[in-house]
Amino acid sequence: MAVPKKKTSKSRKNMRRAHDFLTAPSLSVCPQCKSPKMPHRACPSCGTYKGKEVAGAAKQA
């Protein structure tokens, strides 16, 4: 089995884990209904994408 030869220091461990943090998803605003939506995706509330009604989008009335 592979066993570390030296103890990994707190500094080395934290430097390795520096990129493992979680980032909040970026949100943009829908130009039609002004609700927040994920970029490059159809709006979940009005079902439009780039000013057009998307087929198969679930509309909430």
Image (tube, grey):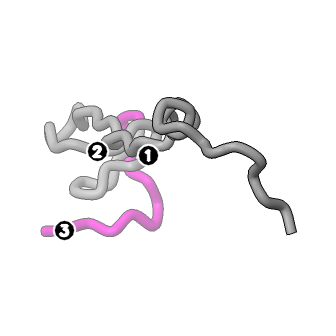
Marks 2 and 1 close (CB-CB < 8 Å): yes
Between the residue at mark 2 and the residue at mark 3, the CA separation in whole angstroms equals: 15 Å
Between the residue at mark 1 and the residue at mark 3, the CA separation in whole angstroms equals: 17 Å
**Mark positioned earlier in the residue sequence (1 or 3):** 1
Tag on residue 60? Answer: 3
Left or right: 30, with 49 as reference point: left
User: Callout 3, which amino acid?
Assistant: Gln
- Give residue 35's quadrant in the image: top left
Region rendered in magenta: 50-61
**Mark positioned earlier in the residue sequence (2 or 3):** 2
Q: Where is residue 25 in the image (x, y as percent from the top left)?
A: 35, 42
Q: Where is residue 53 in the image (x, y as percent from the top left)?
A: 38, 50
- Give residue 36's quadrant in the image: top left
Q: Residue at x 32, y 55 (%)?
A: 47
Q: Where is residue 3 in the image (x, y as percent from the top left)?
A: 78, 59
Name the quadrant of the N terminus. Answer: bottom right
Magenta stretch: helix, strand or loop mostly: loop
Q: Does the magenta stretch include residue 52?
A: yes
Along the line of sight, the residue nearer the viewer: 58 or 2? 2
Along the line of sight, the residue nearer the viewer: 46 or 1? 1
Tag on residue 41? Answer: 1
Tag on residue 16? Answer: none
Between the residue at mark 2 and the residue at mark 1, the CA separation in whole angstroms equals: 7 Å
